Amino acid sequence: MTPNSDPTVQPVPASVVQQVDAADTTLHNPKTAVLSIGSNLGNRLESLQSAVDALADTPGLKVTAVSPVYETEPWGVAPDSQPSYFNAVVVVRTTLPPGSLLERGHAIEEALERVREERWGPRPIDVDIVAYQGVVSDDPQLTLPHPRAHERAFVLVPWRDVDPAAEVPGHGSVEELLAELGTEGITARPDLELSLHA
Ligand SMILES: Nc1ncnc2c1ncn2[C@@H]1O[C@H](COP(=O)(O)OP(=O)(O)OP(=O)(O)O)[C@@H](O)[C@H]1O
Ligand SMILES: Nc1nc2c(c(=O)[nH]1)N=C(CO)CN2
């Protein structure tokens, strides 16, 4: 049979072959990403745990570390205008490209019924991508590393716990950033714990 004599066999366009090859490379080459999770509405610990569970249930993603929980003063808003947050950091190994990881984060936020209204308003759950491997991007849809991560002790303190040698690409080590920034308003909550179900 000549290559095109079977009418059910369609030639595969070169672009599709390239996409499949790229996906295959990705499958064998998981990347490390760091996510920040925060909640200051409703049952804050339960919301963080639901986000960890949903991340762990994501195909192509393995949660490799979950930080301790911190109670943190709301950042970026007038003092006493909002309830305090619970924050944690989750480290993942994933074959999802950055855009798909962001979509997954948004889907988790939506599932936990976040209402997007006021900027930095109270929320049952917020999932941010702090860093994706060493990727640097100024795309407003997905800026990497997160454009404000280096200014936020509520991100850096739990990140340092799970990776003391962590670096914010373009900004320096988490340790040095925290030495500058201080840790005021960040309170450890050793009485609370997020679990990682296998
Ligand atoms: N690294 C990132 N992680 C998450 N979202 C990002 C990132 N970079 C850009 N964005 C974009 O920011 C938009 C707003 O995100 P979101 O509503 O979570 O902001 P916020 O939590 O109120 O504030 P902040 O971005 O300061 O944490 C998202 O729709 C997303 O496209
Ligand atoms: N303490 C604290 N403050 C915040 C947080 C957060 O998670 N924790 N998230 C914000 C928007 O992403 C704005 N301010």
Image: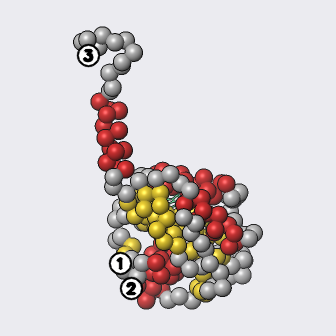
Judge by depth and name the residue closer to the eye, 36 or 78.
36
Q: Amino acid at mark 1?
A: Gly
Which residue is at a point 74% across and 70% down the rendered structure image? 43
Q: Residues within 10 Å of mark 1 (few under 14, many from 20)?
A: few
Q: Position of residue 20 (x, y in %)?
A: 35, 38
Q: Amino acid at mark 3?
A: Pro
Distance CA(mark 1)–CA(mark 2): 7 Å
Nearer the camera: disc 1 or disc 3: 3
For residue 172, the mark is: 1
Per the image, the residue denoted by label 2 is 176
- Sequence order check: which comes first, mark 2 or mark 3? 3
Distance CA(mark 1)–CA(mark 3): 56 Å
Q: Position of residue 49 (x, y in %)?
A: 64, 68
1 and 3 marks in contact (CB < 8 Å): no
1 and 2 marks in contact (CB < 8 Å): yes
For residue 3, the mark is: 3
Please indicate, yes or no, whether residue 118 appears anywhere in the rendered image: yes
Residue at the far right: name it.
42
Secondary structure found at label 3: loop
